[in-house]
Image (tube, helix red, strand yellow):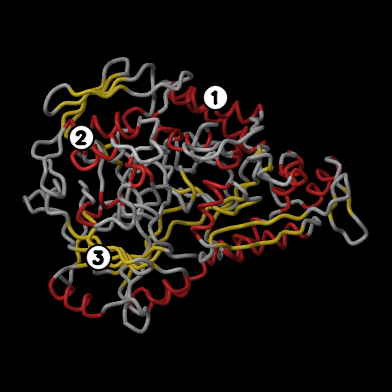
Amino acid sequence: MIFAIFRTVPLRRWFLGILTCISAIAFSGCNPAFFVSEAAQKSQLVTSSLSDPATFNYALSQESSNIFPYTYEGLVAENGVTGEIQPALAESWEISEDQQRIVFTLREGLKWSDGEPLTVDDVVFTYNDIYLNEDIPTDIRDILRIGETGGFPNVQKLDERRVEFTTPEPFAPFLRTTGLAILPAHALRDTVNAKDQEGKPQFLTTWGVDTDPNKIIVNGPYQLERYNTSQRVVLRRNPYYWRESPQGKPQPYIDRIISEIVESTDTAFLQFRSGGLDALGVSPEFFSLLKQEEDKNNFTIYTGGPTLSSSFISFNLNKGSRNGKPLIDPVKSRWFNSLEFRQAVAYAIDRKTMIDNLYRGLGEPQYSNLPIQSPYYLSPEDGLTVYDYNLQKAKELLLKAGFTYNNEGQLLDAEGNRVRFTLITNAGNKLRESMGAQIKRDLGKIGIQVDFTPIAFNTMVEKLTNTLDWEVHLLGFSGGGLEPNNSANVWSMEGGLHSFNQKPTVGQPPIQGWEVAPWEQKINDLYVQGAQELDEEKRKAIYSEAQRLIKENLPYIYLVNPLSMTAVRDRVEGIDYSALGGAFWNIHELKLVDD
């Protein structure tokens, strides 16, 4: 699992947002000749993203808006409707009776986008040389970590088509984790082995956004054709992709996918209404108007129940220092690390008003870190703690924790410091900006001054992953799916997305005085146990306990689950929509009926 601006287990279930360039006036970077001449010859689906890609290196990517669902596949894939594991690069597999050994058989004739053969050697290289390489700081390693010892799968070649995975102890999500992308050994091996001047693998600077697209080798339905900074990403059909229709016709059917880069959901909405978009993630504020226009403008709004993504605010609980300077002001750190303080904030946020006003009623309160579609979800009826809106309860908790109020109703700590902090989020997401504005108002009612500051995407990433000098953020996780272990990188203390108390990653300056709370350790341990347990009922009990601890201690204060809604032009044929997979999880099967 990852931030809504980040990425997690990369099974093919996500899609890029949607926006097009309909005129040279609308976007100064648009080239009408490109779109008109190419559209006359090629079928193309136009999509969008709120931000530029950070990298084209799959193993190093952390943002959820990326090209990888289109460009890579793993040994298995997840059905976007049922969640069932299905064959992908592997045509079949055999699992041992103790479930600690899987032997995969690759399809015959697999090729990379440059025409080179895709072989078992690529599978072994991907896991042993990249994902399990301690010199490569990839979040993927967190979801492959097994048991109390933190061991990893052993991956070895059996013959030209068979590869064996074994685990040192039982690992329940074993099969599902093999949906990770397979990467090309012939294009990347030298970059892993070669070192830069600092002794780090050159792989860490390979396939950045300035790379020649022709040098980026993939195995998915599409490959990178061009990237123009702050303008667009263009993908073209991979002629060596392995899938074909039952009639033997090569897939995918759509020739190009164009993702325009914009910085506002409002702009995307306007472009969709103007007819230049093939799809649009529908936010609640736009739903009513778009619903009235479905028939007239030839599109359909698909709905799939609550999204599997989350929204939350989180306090920086890191007590550490760098070079003698605390990451967080010690005064504020004491507030944030007070359980009563976090609980008071949870009680003070009016989720019902948020749903009614900002989500137009098209959402539900989010109670758990797991989606309600997960078989491991613990509901409030089954014992999950709920923080319903209660200002009186919030104030009582603050007073119990030693806070006081002055004559103006401002909250002060025991030393007389005014309680004030900065809440950040990524700019451009209008709904999230509205949520931040409401949170500012809500917390003002219990005397807390919130300085709400939407900031640029790249600045946000730098704070969350490098400097760690943020106080409170409003973000979300995206793409965790149904399997709890997919979010192991969030709950493991060593995890790359353990953001509320982050350790430095490889190559970052050390942190002195980093501490782990007992409840934090317990959640870490439960996720280890849950991945080890093969009995489903026992797994449910383990993850239920983890959910209870998370809600009781509030490293994340969860807010709202919106309904999953996407508007897609009727000319796009073959949509099989769900909250799990979205609109384009089966992109290889989709057709444009006017081509």
Residue receiving disc 3 = 572
Q: Is residue 20 visible?
A: yes
- Which badge, 2 or 1, comes first in the chain's sequence? 2
Query: Could you say where residue 373 lies in the image, as x and y percent from the top left?
Result: 45, 43
In the rendered structure, the answer to whether residue 479 lies left or right of residue 248 reads right
Q: Residues within 10 Å of mark 3 (few under 14, many from 20)?
A: some
Question: What amino acid type should be assigned to the residue bearing mark 3?
Answer: Val
In the rendered structure, the answer to whether residue 563 lies left or right of residue 94 reads right
Residue receiving disc 1 = 525
Measured Cα–Cα span from mark 2 to mark 1: 33 Å
Q: From the image, which quarter does the N terminus lie in?
A: top left
Q: Are marks 2 and 3 in contact (CB under 8 Å)?
A: no
On screen, residue 577 above or below 74: below
Q: Which mark is residue 122?
A: 2
- Which badge, 3 or 1, comes first in the chain's sequence? 1
Measured Cα–Cα span from mark 3 to mark 1: 46 Å
Q: Are marks 2 and 1 in contact (CB under 8 Å)?
A: no
Q: Residue at x 64, y 57 (%)?
A: 352
Q: Residue at x 22, y 61 (%)?
A: 225
Query: Could you say where residue 259 lies in the image, as x and y percent from the top left?
Result: 32, 65
Q: Residue at x 75, y 43 (%)?
A: 330
Tell me the element at label 3.
strand
Q: Quadrant of residue 591?
A: bottom left
On screen, residue 76 above or below 442: above
Question: What amino acid type should be assigned to the residue bearing mark 1?
Answer: Asp
